[in-house]
Image (tube, rainbow, N blue to C red):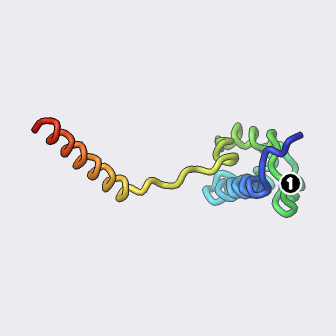
Amino acid sequence: MPNLYTTQTKEDIRHRFINKFDELIENELAESYKEICKNIEITLESFNLLRTKGGVPTLKMLYNLQLVYNVPVDSILFERSHQIDLTTLKKQLATLHETLDQIDDTLSG
């Protein structure tokens, strides 16, 4: 069977999964890893193995995390795009506007 993920991708998914648990606790949506594990129907031992030994979360883990805590699966599987740099975007739009004005002047003149 072909390997779908690189080792780095697996690590990234694992880290994002663990970070979601931390976020749930920080945001007081759960009190502990134990509570989250119980609610998403996995053992605390499974989660601790994932945390300490590596690997990737199972589909069941991802699905139940989404179902119980409304954590989108894609937020774990895929890296989010970076924030838009508004300053650069404004400069690019201004340049585009100037260029379009020049083209309009050339065509009108």
Residue closest to the eye, 54 or 38: 54
x and y percent of residue 35 in the render?
A: 77, 52
User: Which residue is found at the position 68% from the left and 53% from the top?
Assistant: 20
- The answer to which image quadrant residue 105 occupies is top left
| Left or right side of 37 for 30 | left
- The answer to which image quadrant residue 71 occupies is top right
Residue type, label 1? Leu
Q: Residue furthest bottom?
A: 52
User: Which residue is found at the position 76% from the left and 50% from the top?
Assistant: 36
The N terminus - image quarter: top right
x and y percent of residue 14 in the render?
A: 76, 55
Q: Is residue 74 above or below residue 48?
A: above
x and y percent of residue 80 in the render?
A: 58, 50
| Left or right side of 40 for 72 | left
Please say whether residue 66 is visible from this viewpoint. yes
> Mark 1 = which residue?
44
User: Which residue is found at the position 78% from the left and 48% from the top?
Assistant: 5
User: Which residue is found at the position 33% from the left and 52% from the top?
Assistant: 92
Residue closest to the eye, 31 or 92: 92
Residue closest to the eye, 25 or 54: 54
Q: Tell me if mark 1 has few (under 14), some (14-19) or many (20+) residues whose alpha carbon lies within 10 angstroms of its own.
A: some
